[in-house]
Image (cartoon, rainbow, N blue to C red):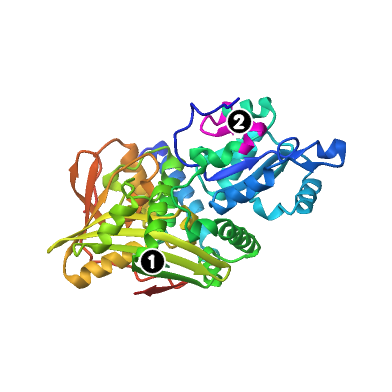
C-alpha cells in the first residue's frame, strides 16, 4: 500500500530514505547475523544516484554494524547523513531533510513496516511512503524522473559529500565564520549562460524555491530564447572551493531596456546559503547597471518560502516603487554597491 | 518614563547585545557601533538578524521597515522593536 501520496504535491523527489532490515536487505541484521541484499535493490540505488537523486537511511539498528554491512555490499558511499539508531522514523526523516537542506516534501521513505510508514505519514504527510515490495517499480515512477540529468545532477552526491567534509572542518575550526570561510579558498564565477548551461539552469530554476525571487520557473526553451535575445542577459554563477565544486549555483535574468534594466529572476541554490555568497551575484548585476548608466529594478513575487530574497534586495538598498497585484517592483539607486567579500575570489567573463 | 517601561527597554537592549556579541568574538560593542561595517553583508546574515528580532520579540517586521539602517546597531534595532510593538506607523519612520 502507498500512503502519503494525497498529502504531497507532485514535485520531484530529491532524496530517497531507505529502511535496512527487510527493505534494503532480507533479514534482520541484529537477529539473523547474516543478511542478503534484496534482489534489484542495488540496481535501483545506482539508477537513482545517476539521476542525481540523493539517498539516505533511516533504520532502527546498531550504527557501526549496519554501516559495516553496507560496506560489505559496496553501497556505503551512496548514502548521505544516515540515521541509524533508535529514534522514531519521523525524527530521522526530519533530521535528513535538515542535514541535506532540502524540503521534507522532496523526500520519499521506503520501509517494509506499515507502522513505520504510518508514523512518518502522520507527522509528515508530505513525505512519499512506499512499501519495500514497490522498489522495483521506483525507476518507472514519474516523481523519480527528473526532466533532465545534467553533469551537476550526476555529481550531486559527491558535492554533498564535499559539503559533509566542509561541515566537519567548520566544527573543528574555532575562529569566526568569516575566518573559516577564508580557509575554504572559494572562487565564485559569473558568466553569460551558454547553450551548455541551459539544462542545468532549468534544473536550478525548478529545484530552487527558497532563494527564488519570483518563484517563476523557466523551461529550457524559454531560457534558450533569452540567451539569443539582445534585450536580455542571462547570467549563471558557479562556486568551487578546496573541497571541490558546488556546480552551478546561481541564475540571474535581466531584461535590458534603454533606461531601465529589470531583474526578472534572481535565484541561488540552497546549498550555498551558508557560504556567504548569496549577495554576490546581485551586486554584480548592480555594478553592470551602474556602468551602463541605467536604472535597476527587480521583480519580487512573495511566497511562503522566499522572504530571504526580499531581505536580500532590501538590505542591498532596493526600495519598493510599485505593486502590480502580488508582484512588487523594487528599485535600487545604485549608490552603495558592496565589493565582494575578502574571503572570496570573483571571476567574471 | 515609568520604572516598568524602563525595565522593558533595558531588557530589549540586553537581548540584542546578547545576540550580537557572540558573533564577533574578542570585540567589544557600544550600542551605536555598526554591525554591518566590519565585513560583507550577506543574505544569510541579513536574514539571521531579521529572524532574531522577530523571534526574540514576537513581532513581524513589516516590509517598509526591512531596511538595513533599522538593524545596524543595538540602538537602531531596539528603536525598531519599540516602534513595531507600539503598533503600526505610530513612531517615526527613518528617512
Which residue corresponds to mark 2? A120
- Give the distance between the C-alpha atoms of the residues marked 1 and 2, in whole angstroms: 46 Å
For the residue pair B46 and A260, the one nearer the viewer reads as: A260
Disc 2: host chain = A
Q: Which mark is residue B37?
A: 1
Q: Answer above or below: position of B56 versus A337.
A: above
Residue occupying image coordinates x 23% and y 65% = A334
Q: Residue A342 in the image: x percent, y percent?
A: 44, 73
Task: Classify mark 2: helix, strand or loop.
Answer: helix
Disc 1: host chain = B
Identify the image quadrant of the C terminus of chain B.
bottom left
- In this rendering, would A233 be left or right of A244? left
Query: What is the span of residues highlighted in magenta in the rendered image?
Result: A122-136
Q: Residue A55 in the image: x percent, y percent?
A: 61, 47
Task: Classify mark 1: helix, strand or loop.
Answer: loop
B10 drawn magenta: no
The answer to whether residue A314 is visible is no
Residue occupying image coordinates x 54% and y 40% = A140
Q: Residue A332 in the image: x percent, y percent?
A: 22, 59
Residue occupying image coordinates x 32% and y 40% = B84
For the residue pair A222 and B78, the one nearer the viewer reads as: A222
Amino acid at each position: 500500500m502507498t500512503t502519503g501520496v494525497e498529502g504531497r504535491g507532485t514535485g520531484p523527489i530529491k532524496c530517497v530514505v531507505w529502511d535496512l532490515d527487510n527493505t534494503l536487505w532480507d533479514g534482520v541484521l541484529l537477529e539473523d547475523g547474516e543478511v542478503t541484499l534484496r534482489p534489484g535493490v542495488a540496481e535501483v540505488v545506482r539508477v537513482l544516484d545517476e539521476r542525481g537523486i540523493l539517498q539516505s537511511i533511516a533504520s532502527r539498528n546498531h550504527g557501526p554494524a549496519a554501516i559495516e554491512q553496507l560496506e560489505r555490499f559496496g553501497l556505503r558511499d551512496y548514502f548521505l547523513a544516515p540515521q541509524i539508531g533508535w529514534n522514531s522514523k519521523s525524527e530521522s526523516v526530519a533530521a535528513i531533510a535538515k542535514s541535506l537542506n532540502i524540503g521534507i516534501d522532496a523526500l520519499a521513505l521506503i520501509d517494509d513496516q506499515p507502522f513505520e510508514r504510518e508514523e512518518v505519514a502522520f507527522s509528515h504527510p508530505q513525505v512519499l511512503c512506499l512499501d519495500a515490495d514497490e522498489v522495483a517499480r521506483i525507476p518507472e515512477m514519474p516523481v523519480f524522473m527528473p526532466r533532465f540529468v545534467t553533469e551537476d545532477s550526476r555529481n550531486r552526491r559527491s558535492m554533498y559529500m564535499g559539503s559533509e567534509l566542509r561541515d566537519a572542518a567548520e566544527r573543528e575550526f574555532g575562529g569566526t565564520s568569516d575566518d573559516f570561510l577564508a580557509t575554504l579558498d572559494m572562487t565564485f564565477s559569473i558568466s553569460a549562460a551558454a547553450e551548455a548551461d541551459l539544462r542545468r539552469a532549468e534544473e536550478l530554476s525548478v529545484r530552487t524555491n527558497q532563494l527564488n525571487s519570483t518563484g517563476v520557473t523557466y523551461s529550457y526553451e524559454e531560457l534558450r530564447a533569452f540567451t539569443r535575445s539582445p534585450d536580455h542577459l542571462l547570467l549563471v554563477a558557479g562556486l568551487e572551493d578546496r573541497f571541490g565544486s558546488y556546480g552551478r549555483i546561481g541564475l540571474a535574468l535581466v531584461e535590458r531596456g534603454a533606461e531601465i534594466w529589470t531583474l526578472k529572476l534572481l535565484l541561488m541554490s540552497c546549498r550555498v546559503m551558508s557560504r556567504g555568497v548569496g549577495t554576490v551575484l546581485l551586486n554584480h548585476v548592480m555594478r553592470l547597471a551602474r556602468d551602463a548608466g541605467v536604472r535597476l529594478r527587480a521583480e519580487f513575487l512573495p511566497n511562503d518560502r522566499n522572504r530571504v530574497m526580499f531581505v536580500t534586495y532590501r538590505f542591498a538598498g532596493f526600495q519598493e516603487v510599485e505593486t502590480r497585484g502580488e508582484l512588487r517592483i523594487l528599485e535600487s539607486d545604485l549608490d552603495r554597491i558592496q565589493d565582494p567579500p575578502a574571503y572570496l575570489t570573483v571571476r567574471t567573463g | 518614563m515609568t520604572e516598568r517601561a524602563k525595565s522593558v527597554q533595558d531588557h530589549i537592549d540586553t537581548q540584542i547585545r546578547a545576540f550580537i556579541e557572540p558573533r564577533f568574538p574578542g570585540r567589544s560593542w557600544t550600542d551605536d557601533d555598526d554591525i554591518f561595517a566590519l565585513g560583507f553583508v550577506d543574505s544569510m546574515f541579513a536574514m539571521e538578524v531579521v529572524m532574531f528580532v522577530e523571534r526574540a520579540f514576537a513581532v513581524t517586521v513589516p516590509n517598509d521597515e526591512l531596511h538595513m539602517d533599522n538593524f545596524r546597531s543595538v540602538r537602531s534595532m531596539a528603536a525598531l522593536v519599540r516602534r513595531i510593538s507600539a503598533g503600526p506607523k505610530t513612531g517615526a519612520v527613518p528617512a
